[in-house]
Image (tube, rainbow, N blue to C red):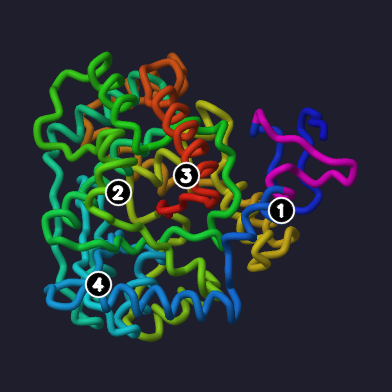
Amino acid sequence: MNRLKNQRCSRCVMDASDPDITFNANGICNHCVEFDGVTRQNWFPNEEGKQHLARIVERIKVDGQGKEYDCIIGLSGGVDSSYLALEVAEWGLRPLVIHVDAGWNSELAVANIEKIVTHCMLDLHTHVVDWEEMRDLHLAYLRSGYSNQDVPQDHVFFASLYHFATKNRIRYILSGGNLATEGVFPTAWHGGSAMDAINLRAINKKFGERSLRTYNTISFFEYYIWYPFVKKIRTVRPLNFMPYDKKSAITNLERLIGWRSYGRKHGESLFTKVFQNDYLPRKFGYDKRLPHFSSLIVSEQMTREEAMAKLDEPLYDSEELEIDLNYFCKKLRISREQYEDFITGRSSQYTDYPNWLGRHRLLKSIQARVESLLGRRINIYS
């Protein structure tokens, strides 16, 4: 394997903007090699997946007997979670639908969520995050110059799901995350886990101005021990056990419930829209379309030629960018000059702040020893 400056994979569209990318003699990148050799082992868009999914659904129904809800779905209004909600209703499950409002919902996202829960006759609980805490945490991350500015939203979203699962004695969290559309991801772009509350609190303590009093977090112990082993909560990604095709999913959603597309991945959050399509490319040179399109290429939902043509299109329409940036800055109560300073200012990475990597390595070491003694793999995580 090797890497040349400006080289692009001959199979997908990942390039040397990923500092860890390597290419084999045929010009194929390590992401494609890993997808074929490792990721595919956990992806079942076939009859085997159908049978496995049927067993999962039956187990959820059995474990949920006598309870008001047998599972939880986190619903953002995006295509993956929306399509999953339709499927779950078809399977006859009884989910509690959780939406976490972190302050950045587009009107279209709210409309899509309402259409889904109405069509499927599902119970929706919306958890509204305290905006002043959320705003301060956003600003702390912007001051830090950390590449993954989505951590404040991602962490509270998943933490809230676990809290609601525990409160309602629900064992199964169903996620729209899937390998068909997210099978390629350059870890060097973000480094650490968005679930690392040690890292999150360290950044907030150094750069924030408020304490996190009501913002939901998950500790290392809760995430790796308490929820999976004591509460026996399982996160399941059903879309990995079916032939999930994004274009078909959008067509079905539009036809059945009048769902409307955002035009881009994660467009349901204006913060994520600005972060991925303006902040990241200008500050770090990362174009999130590369892993998004590459995932669709390796899962055979898009050709490389189609991806290259889309990459020639601008990331943002200039008028749309101006409108979004004005709203973005106004909501965070910062000036455009401050926003530009965040882009041109300091940059940092996950390991620059306290984190749970040492604890994770210790836990994996203990897991390896236990697996050796038992003679089998311990696999209770998603």
Give how far across and how far down residue 173 sits, in percent.
30, 61
Going 67% across and 60% down the picture, which residue do you hit? Answer: 297
Going 65% across and 33% down the picture, which residue do you hit? Answer: 17
Give the amino acid at mark 3.
Answer: Ser
Dot label at residue 229: 2
Query: Which badge, 3 or 4, comes first in the chain's sequence?
Result: 4
Observer-side mark, 3 or 2, equals 2
Q: Are marks 3 and 4 in contact (CB under 8 Å)?
A: no
Give the amino acid at mark 4.
Answer: Asp
Going 42% across and 32% down the picture, which residue do you hit? Answer: 363
Give how far across and how far down residue 329 sits, in percent.
27, 33
- Label 1 to label 4, Cα distance in Å? 34 Å
The residue beneath circle 1 is 37
Q: Quadrant of residue 262?
A: bottom left
- Label 3 to label 1, Cα distance in Å? 41 Å
Query: What stretch of residues is rendered in magenta?
Result: 19-33
